[in-house]
Every structure is written in structure tokens, then in C-alpha cells.
Amino acid sequence: MRRASSCVVLVVTMSFGYAANAGSPTSIDAFNKALSSATRAMDNAATLAVWDDDGISLLPDTPPIVGKPAIGRFLASVGKQLQGAHMQQFELTCHDAHTAGDWASEWCDEHQVVVFTNGQRTFDGRGRMLLVLHQGADHRWRIQREMWQSLKTP
């Protein structure tokens, strides 16, 4: 179940920015909304779009997942394990966004409820992420590094 929990989390975590207008498509707020939307929809293509080409995901009990192609393969593998599942609830609350040139960081609390159609028990999990973002030439923020940890459910 630990592997399944990590897989659910990666689907959730697979996305920041500095701009005068927080609603701009290049703002950290827009990044967070894109990450939340992709996660709620369990949309691997949208999730992969918020990653830098050479991004690295660090998940518990999993070797580092290095580069967009590897992240894509991991997401596809997770998608197979979650076939028929749907995200019933997802909340992402991010804190302390800091920018320095074309780099940014923030940490986020997340809560997700995933319902399975195959009789598997509903997953109700919480976690905390540290995100390091890089702003590309198109001024959009993408995940350069992601580290996630599980939190005990209250």
C-alpha cells in the first residue's frame, strides 16, 4: 500500500512564478492553479506540462525520478495502477513563495481523496511538498525539484 500511496501522491504532485498580476499565466498563483487542476482531473499530460525538462521528483521509498521522460513513464505506470479511480477531493494550500530571478520555491500542504471502482479501499491522504521552480524563456514556472512527505491523517 505504501507504493500505491506514493503513486497517488505523484499523480497529485506532478508545477510557480513572479509577476505583478497574480492572475497572469506566468504567476506562481497561476502555476498552483494549473497544478491543482491537473491533479483534480488526474490528467497526466497536464501534470507533465508543469515540469521542467530536467526536473527531479523525490518521493519516499522511491529512487529519484530524473527528467521529464522518466517522470512521464512513472505517471503512465501510476495511471495503470489507478485505472478506474477518480479524485473525489483535492486541496492544495501553498505557503511562503519566494523568488530570486528565474528561480522560486514554496512549500505546500495537500489533501486528497481518491475513490477506486475496483473495490479497493478509498485513499484519504495528506502530504507536504517542497517545490523548487524554474521560470523558462516563456516566463512560465515549472517544477525543477519536488520532494514530498506523507502526513498522518487526523
Image: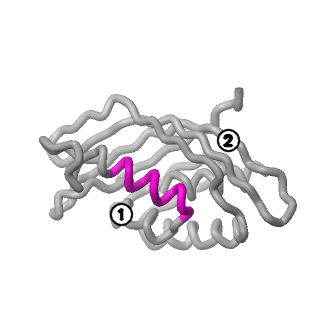
Q: Give the range drawn in magenta.
A: 31-42
Side of 37 relative to 154 (left or right): left
Asked whether residue 39 is drawn in magenta, I would say yes
Q: Which of 60 and 96 is in front in this view?
A: 96
Secondary structure, mark 2, is strand
- Number of labels in the image equals 2
Cα separation between marks 2 and 1? 28 Å
Asked whether residue 38 is drawn in magenta, I would say yes
Coloring basis for residues: one colour
Q: Quadrant of the image for the C terminus? A: top right
Question: Splitting the image into 4 quarters, where does residue 148 fall?
Answer: top right
Q: Which mark is residue 94?
A: none
The three-letter code of the residue at mark 2 reads Gly
The three-letter code of the residue at mark 1 reads Asp
Question: Splitting the image into 4 quarters, where does residue 152 fall?
Answer: top right
Visible residue check, residue 90: yes
Q: Is residue 150 above or below residue 139?
A: above
| Dot 2 crowding, Cα within 10 Å, few <14, some 14–19, many 20+ | some
Q: Is residue 40 above or below residue 67?
A: above
- Which of discs 2 and 1 lies nearer the camera? The answer is 2
Residue at 17% from the left image edge and 57% from the top image edge: 139
Visible residue check, residue 81: no
Q: Nearer the viewer, residue 37 or 132?
A: 37
**Chief secondary structure of the magenta portion:** helix
Residue at 32% from the left image edge and 56% from the top image edge: 142
Residue at 57% from the left image edge and 67% from the top image edge: 74
Residue under circle 2? Answer: 125
Residue under circle 1? Answer: 54
Question: Splitting the image into 4 quarters, where does residue 20 fall?
Answer: top left
Where does residue 96 sit, x and y in percent of width and height?
33, 29
Secondary structure, mark 1, is strand
